[in-house]
Image (spheres, grey):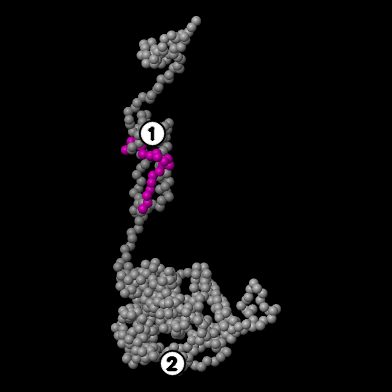
Amino acid sequence: MSFMIQDSPTSRYNQQNRPGSARRRPGSSINPITGEETPVYRPPSRPQSRPPTRPFSLRPEGVPELDLHCFKAEPKTVLPEQYDYVLDSGRSGVSTVSWGTDTERSYRDFQENDTGRGYQGYQASARSARNNIEKDFKHLKLKTEDDIKPVKKKTYGEIRKEVEEEEDYLDQNWSKRKPASKAEMLKKMDAEELLEHNKQQKLIETVMIDQLSRPVISDPDQDSRISVPVSERYHRGSQRMLHASKIRTKNTTTENMLSKRVRFGARILTRNGHDAMRELTGFFFHFDNTLTIYEFRQFGKSAKALPFVTRGRYGHIQGPREDEPYNLMDIFSGNEIIIDTRGQHSLPDTVKKRDRVYFKITDVDEEEKQILLQEETYRSQNKQEMINRRILDGVQEEVRERLKKRGIKTVTGLGRYYRKLDKTGSGVLYKFELEKGLFTFHIELPPQDLDQAFDVLDPDETGELDYSVYMRGVIGQMVESRKNLVRKAFRKIDSQKRGVITVSEIKKYFNASFQPPYKQGATPGVSSLKAFLEAITSSPDQEEITYVEFEEYYEGLSISVDDNNEFANILHNTWNI
């Protein structure tokens, strides 16, 4: 019996379109052998139940309106100013407002947040909100309008009196140091003293090594052949120490000879700010009346002392003691030492441009000097030199007395006037130009006094003089302790060591929290910073200030301030040094 199908199979299209096809009956299937249609069992589907639609309302059905009569009006109170009170029921996102108020809460929000709570849930929310409000109000110190005391208005006289008392307080306390604890002051002093001590030790060590080794190495006698026993000869590769040398030359100096010295600080008298800020230390050797000057330089974390003036015997270039060598009596604070720049290879190029370099002695080790003075007696000062000193002191005393109330304006204006006349930049002016500047700024002196002062300052009778030397001789200078503070303040502002500072750098470091007294150059109603910039600059467009301009301002201020402590406190309060 053959079960092979003889005809071609029916296409899917025909099966779909036949009336009795299984394709049209999704719930039946066809047996491929018998061709019978067999129904397929399917589980009965569950009817989908949907909740009856309710009309949209702000309050669900069956939920009565909340009674908020419990929130009664409180007595009229005055809340503290700038107090932002926020109502919070303790449940984030749930409002404590009743269903009867205007709210945007819908029935859907009620289903999501409060399903199953109903009226009791909202009663609990309202009760919680009320308790929180009462609790927060208990912590506030509220005052009613009746408790506020009226403010007593001050009269114009009382306000004026308070302002005058405040001005007097600032005027009296400008020169007082800021309150600082004793421990902080001692700590700062100890740190500065330790730094200075380490610097001096480094300088002395460098000078001793340099001065002991230089003559031995550079002396031509070292080239001479001297027969030395074989037992005392150095073997090849052995280290030869400086003091182990058996060769003695003519210029050899010992450590004992170099120990008889006097250390002194110095600075350069120049209009170049970078050279004026150099830290110089000199040594005067008593056994041969020679002196040398070294410069202390900081290279990152390391510090070195570099030769500035070669050691040698230097004498007076001008004056009554011309050609006489400097001795120990010439080493004192405030004295000037003039050295010829020829043959000084260690001097910078800015200093070599001049034929002479002027050094001002700032401080001296008096203890070492007194020990050396006991060993030898020196003759008294030259008589003519004493007369010259008295002439200049008399002129300076008279000028400074006249400039007592206008020191800043006169000194800064006179320096600015001379710089305009200096067309070549050398600083040298004729006598009539220098005297004309004095009369322009109302420094009127008898003609004989001016002639005597000019003769002392110009011993060579050239008829011309550097205006810086003339100003120092006629007006005078502040003491070196004040000058050190001025240099310290300028060094703090000039962090890049250019010798020039800018207006922006002054504003950065200037402390304008105090107004200086009127007697010190302050103008009523003008800030201290503005008054300082107006006095130190020639025009509002000036952006850079040289060291000379900075120094002239404090030279004029020094004339108005007699007390050294008051002058020091002004600088401390102004620049925080």
Residue at horizontal 56%, vertical 76%?
A: 205
What secondary structure prevails in the magenta region? loop
68 w.r.t. 382: above or below: above
Mark 1 lies on residue = 110
Q: Secondary structure at mark 1?
A: helix
Give the number of the disc on residue 320.
2
Residue at horizontal 37%, vertical 51%?
A: 83
Give the number of the disc on residue 535.
none
Q: Nearer the viewer, residue 24 or 241?
A: 241
Rendering coords of residue 301 (x, y %): 52, 68
| Kind of residue at badge 1 | Phe
Q: Is residue 515 on the magenta stretch?
A: no
Q: In the figure, residue 395 lies in which quadrant?
A: bottom left
Furthest residue in direction top, as rendered? 1
Cα separation, mark 1 vs mark 2, equals 112 Å
410 w.r.t. 79: above or below: below
Q: Is residue 85 on the magenta stretch?
A: yes
Q: Nearer the viewer, residue 353 or 331?
A: 353
Decide if residue 19 is on the left or right side of residue 375. left
| Kind of residue at badge 2 | Pro
Identify the magenta region: 82-102
Pick whichever of labels 1 and 2 is earlier in the sequence. Answer: 1
Rendering coords of residue 318 (x, y %): 43, 89
From the image, state whether disc 1 or disc 2 is nearer to you: 2
